Image (cartoon, rainbow, N blue to C red):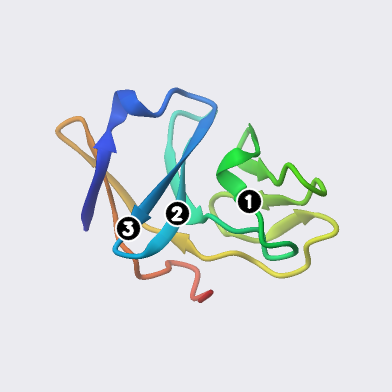
Amino acid sequence: MIRICAVEDVPKGTAISADVDGTQIALVHGEDEQFYAVHDECSHAAVALSEGEVEGCTLECWLHGSRFDLRTGAPTGLPATEPVPVYPVEVRDGDIYVSLTPSNGVTR
């Protein structure tokens, strides 16, 4: 697990971009109070998901409106049809840690 930032650096309902050993991730503080990490690139168009909107447990790509489930990486709205990698997240002592081994088996 690699430390990304402090919990307070990611307000509820927002996403930030982080470079983790050369892998761009979108770190999301979901509206369910949980933290999620997904690959920071839409599987439909090569744009940053971290610039999209968080709604519930989904993240919407700002360019074409594809939505991704933050728990599974599965697309929940077109035009995306391929999932994005999801990375395990741990919160310890007020800090957020991420593993670069995708929990959903999807590689980029």
Whether residue 30 is visible here, answered yes or no, is: no
State how far apart marks 1 and 2 are (Cα).
Answer: 15 Å
Q: Is residue 108 above or below residue 67?
A: below
Task: Name the element at disc 2.
Answer: strand
The spot of residue 102 in percent (x, y) is 42, 68
Is tag 2's residue or tag 3's residue first in the polypeptide sequence? 3
| Amino acid at circle 1 | Asp
Label drawn at residue 25? 2
- Residue at the image position 30 percent from the left and 29 percent from the top: 7
Q: Position of residue 98 (x, y in %)?
A: 30, 54
Residue 30: x and y in percent read 51, 33
Q: Secondary structure at mark 1?
A: strand
What residue is rendered at 44% in x and 28% in y?
33
Dots 2, 3 in contact, CB < 8 A: yes
For the N terminus, the image quarter is bottom left
Tell me if mark 1 has few (under 14), some (14-19) or many (20+) residues whose alpha carbon lies within 10 angstroms of its own.
many
**Quadrant in the rendering for residue 23:** bottom left
Image quadrant where residue 24 sits: bottom left
Tell me the residue at 51%/76% (across/down): 107
Mark closer to the chain start, 3 or 1: 3
| Residue 49 against residue 55 in the figure, above or below | below
The residue singled out by tag 1 in the image is 69
| Left/right of residue 37 with respect to residue 31 in the rendered view | left
The residue under label 3 is which amino acid type?
Val
In the picture provided, is 16 more to the left or to the right than 84? left
Instruction: Please provide percent x and percent y for residue 81.
Output: 78, 67
Tell me the CA gap for discs 3 and 1: 21 Å
SS at mark 3?
strand
- Residue picked out by circle 3: 20
User: Amino acid type of disc 2?
Assistant: Ile
Nearer the observer: mark 3 or 1; the answer is: 3
Closer to the eye: label 1 or 2: 2
